[in-house]
Amino acid sequence: MDEREIRNLIGDVKAGRLSRRRFIQTMVGLGLGAPLASQMLASAGIAAAQTRGSYPAAKRGGGGQLKVLWWQAATLLNPHFAVGTKDQDGSRIFYEPLAAFDPDGNLVPILAAEIPSVQNGTLSKDGRTVTWRLKKNVVWHDGKPFTADDVVFNWEYAADPATAATTIGAYKDIEKIDKPDSHTARLTFKQPMPFWSEAFCGAPRGQIIPKHLFETYKGGKSREAPTNLKPIGTGPYKFVDFKPGDTIRAELNPTYHLPNRPFFDTLEMKGGGDAASAARAVLQSGEFDFAWNLQVADEILKRMEQGGGRGKVDIATAGNIEHIQCNQTDPWTEVEGERSSAKTKHPFLTDPAVRQALNLLVDRASVQEQIYGRLGQSTANFLNAPQKFRSPNMKWEFSIDKANQLLDGAGWKRGGDGIRAKDGKRLKMVYQTSTNPERQKTQQIVKQAAAKAGIDIELKSVVASVYFSSDVANPDTYSKFYTDIQMYTTTMGAPDPASFMEQFTSWEVAGTKNKWQGRNITRWRNDEYDKLWKSQETELDLVKRAALFVKMNDLAIQNVVVIPVLWRMVISAVSNRLKNTDVSGWDSNFWNLANWYREG
Amino acid sequence: MWRYFLRRLLISIPVILGISVVIFAILASAPGDPFEELATNPNVPPEVRANLRAQFGLDDPLAVRYVRWFVSMVKGDWGFSFQSRVNVDTLILQRLPTTIFVLGSALLVGLLVAVPIGTLSALRPYSIFDQIATTFAFIGFSLPPFFTGLVLILVFSIYLDWLPFIYRADIAGTGFRWWWEHVRQAIMPVTVLGLFQGAALTRFVRSAVLDVVRLDYVNTARAKGLSEWITVVKHVIRNALIPVVTLLALQVPTIFGGAIITEQIFRVPGIGSLLIAAILANDTPVVMAVTFVFSCLMVLSNLVADLLYGWLDPRISFR
């Protein structure tokens, strides 16, 4: 499908010949993420869908207690300091963003009265200003009204480097925010902003805290705010009690801005323990209603589902990709105090034939079937979601024969021990990953196939706390990448792929200069890719922009910079009676919390 | 005795100091970064992490950090958790009641099991009762709590569906229901810990009673015509329990250790699970504080054991 066809489809939606839903499905079928597809419609002036699911309760409350279980406990309740999803989810019970991302990546208004669109004149054509109209009946839990002042304050608070907010990335590009009236906020960005919904939308970066309680705790004093642990927000539930690292308790907010919501009288979010027993508490013993992020073997989950019959596993898509990286630099030679220096070249992984052969030797189907089951999907793409960004062009194949032919053709001859060599360089490589049963099994599958093609792979596993640390002194971190190939999962975190795809740009190359904090771990440099990435920054036409990301993905895949192994899903366990959880891979598990209810 | 007590207390100070240096050094040389999750998140710029590290003084040299920690500890400031951004003492105090409740009940259960069974076994050594009790005692302390914990969960929560296996410190409700819920959720962790303790204690009680029961004064008591009950309770057990009491004092830190794992399994929000979570998150101030509390507890309970021994048995003098 080319650009013109997509434009025709958008025209059909405009004229009412094609449903919004159908359009998004088509785009997703093309490999574009749902958030992108709906943004396409928004930029073409088609209003966003407003409702999802049905909510049967005719009055507030009366639903008893909602018990949810996170196997990592929330440790703090200020969304701007959230370190992981556990903290974001914990704060999201009390705080809300202007809009949330649903499972398809669509924006759903929460504190906003409507989603900005070109049609309404609330989204400028040059992509620099976005006007948010806020709901007028919203009050904070302490009775003060929610106004545009709060929106402005959150920008000032998060963008101040002294605050050290983890959300700063979403706010630092805002030039100013005007308040035409008390319930309108007009954002002006420093440059055209294709992903204008990064600020103030979605739980990871968009939750809004009250100005009147945080005003005096901006910048360096931010950590002293008593409300960091006792949130006062606008959400469906009010704060009762918080024990860091253990439990959050909340109760119904009688002044919530949506009618008849929330359903439950009280809410308890328990944390700690391990993923498997969290799944068990929902699926088998039914002690809890919902459990988050279950990284548990699919086999075990299936057994629990069948054995208990009290809940089911919910699978949501996100952009998490388990992939193998091919080092473009030489990990075995030290240059100016660093190995894998950008000044070196890998002795054999720079030969495209070797990388192509490796790509043919990863048996993704077996990895999925034998190891991950429903928890992942084999894929040829690095960028898999939202669907509008997924490339339809890439295919993967597992063929030892083809790999052998390729290597033979490129002049890599088998030696006496069966290992191929060329110009005195032998195809022996070290394959590193974190210690984790699934990853070690995957390593074995690759190693065996590679051995049949005359490549000798030595396996290495590093404890996760070392591997994923940023310890500059440790040679075994993933960002140092002192081996030939390595494998881990990288996450996307936002329904827009810009920062995700930045990890192949030349200015992100990890090394001594940036203390290995650069995100281009493979150290691959490609002018064409850099250009593509730069042009997406100013490309406001969402269809063209999606095409740019598809091209970037294809470039990285065709060059075998990375070998995608598995597109990993977000797994939760939900009680059979709990409805409307509608987990979204692009937002907090609680993005739709106000609409959760229990049946029967 | 006071002089002895003071002297011992003074000796403890360098011991505790030494312990703190060792813990600090180990923690500092262990890999990991409290803001690790930010490093792998593409949406958080690296400057944020650098800023946070600077704010929490993580980039200073080891010695500086230790001195800073020590000085504030002496002043009563236990530090500030990287993860929760609250004072460490608040965190610990929040969790202390739960730990004390669970550990206290476990110790009580252990004693209630150990004293009668141990005494009965000793009074009729090598009888069938003794054989059975001995067998179970051996099984009891050979099986680690994490194993028995899982078995209990499987049987009572999954198959029988009688008891909850997730411990909740905050239970809504009042009166009878509140008590009942608390008892119900505490049954499994307390049983696991209590029986583990009880098994070992049974053996100690048995051997202590065996030693005493053969002594002449017991025969005298019997010859006086005292009933068997009075003889055993007033004359035998009283004397036999002296070594057991000191042993209990010595065992308190061990119980804390066992509780770490049990707390993790049943999600008991106590000190032990706080320690594990802090270790996993590289939350150094919390790890430091908790381990430091544990080591102080160890030193103190040693001291208490020695004092108790002398107080219970006046034949022992302090020098």
Image: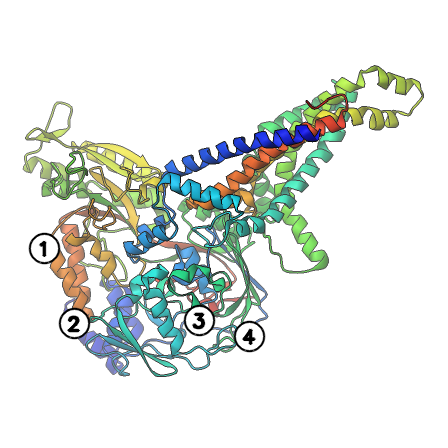
Q: Position of residue A262 (x, y in %)?
A: 52, 71
Residue furthest to the right in view is B225
Q: Which residue is mark 4?
A: A254
Badge 3 density bin: few <14, some 14–19, many ≥20, Cα 10 Å? many
Check the image and report above or below for A284 versus A453.
below
The residue drawn where x is 69% and y is 57% is: B177
Q: Say which label, 1 or 4, has the lower sequence index.
A: 4
Q: Quadrant of residue A204?
A: bottom left
Residue nearest the viewer, comparing B288 with B269:
B288
Q: Which residue is mark 3?
A: A210
Q: Say which label, 2 or 4, has the lower sequence index.
A: 2
Q: Say which label, 2 or 3, has the lower sequence index.
A: 2
Q: Position of residue B188 (x, y in %)?
A: 62, 43
Q: Chain of mark 2?
A: A
Q: Is there a contact, CB below 8 Å, between mark 4 and mark 3?
A: no
Q: Mark 1 and mark 3: span between their CA atoms?
A: 45 Å
Q: Which residue is mark 2?
A: A5
Q: Which residue is mark 1?
A: A527
